[in-house]
């Protein structure tokens, strides 16, 4: 694999690539995946395994077995409870396992994730199904990711080379 330092070399994946599935239509996730694989980076980019309202065990295992997380955040991100749950789990693992995380704010600003006002309608919808505790967990994850130095991506730029440089930096 691409990671050479001890401690992380036993992990199966170099990068866990997380995104809302509709961002694939914009090709950012696919372009990113292809560029990383071309550089011999082991990238997990599979479709999420989901059971009822929880993340499946193989998905969580892939997260735990990754050196770093790259999260593509989009304007409709909070509409999906799956995205929010995945983000909350990644934030937990970032904290407990000391993993690197790079948020890519795709067509959205970091302050949207810190302040969350653009997502109020989505949270009200989620509140019909999920409890306040779960909503607060998701809000905390969004706030945390909004405060991580990341990359603000406008629709017309290619960010693959930046991600490759970032990965080489964290893996050296």
Image (cartoon, rainbow, N blue to C red):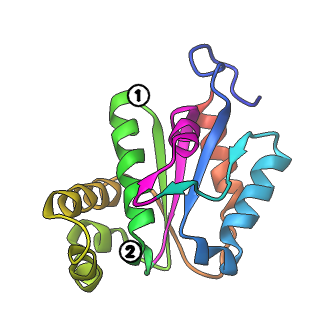
Instruction: Name the residue nearer the viewer: 56 or 152.
Output: 56
> Farthest residue in the left direction?
132
Q: Please, what secondary structure does the residue beneath circle 2 have? A: loop
* Residue beneath disc 1: 97
Residue range in magenta is 52-74
Q: Residues within 10 Å of mark 1 (few under 14, many from 20)?
A: few
Image side of residue 92 versus residue 30, left or right: left
Residue 104 to residue 61: above or below: below
* Residue beneath disc 2: 109
Image side of residue 72 versus residue 46, left or right: left
Q: Please, what secondary structure does the residue beneath circle 1 have? A: helix
Q: Residues within 10 Å of mark 2 (few under 14, many from 20)?
A: some
> Farthest residue in the right direction?
38
Q: Position of residue 153 (x, y in %)?
A: 54, 71
Q: Which of the 4 quarters of the picture holds residue 120?
A: bottom left
Which residue does the image show at 71% across and 60% down from the upper left?
A: 32
Q: Which mark is residue 26?
A: none
């Amino acid at each position: 694999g691409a990671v050479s330092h001890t401690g992380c070399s036993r992990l199966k994946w170099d990068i866990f690539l997380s995104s809302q599935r509709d961002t694939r239509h914009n090709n950012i996730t696919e372009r990113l995946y292809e560029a990383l694989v071309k550089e011999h980076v082991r990238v997990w980019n599979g479709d999420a395994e989901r059971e009822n309202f929880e993340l499946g065990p193989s998905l969580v295992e892939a997260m735990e077995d990754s050196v770093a997380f790259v999260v593509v955040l989009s304007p409709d991100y909070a509409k999906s409870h799956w995205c929010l749950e995945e983000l909350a789990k990644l934030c937990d693992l970032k904290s407990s396992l000391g993993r690197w995380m790079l948020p890519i704010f795709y067509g959205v600003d970091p302050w949207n994730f810190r302040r969350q006002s653009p997502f109020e309608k989505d949270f009200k919808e989620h509140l019909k199904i999920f409890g306040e505790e779960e909503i607060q967990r998701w809000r905390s994850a969004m706030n945390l990711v909004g405060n991580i130095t990341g990359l603000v991506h406008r629709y017309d730029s290619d960010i693959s080379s930046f991600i490759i440089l970032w990965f080489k930096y964290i893996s050296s």
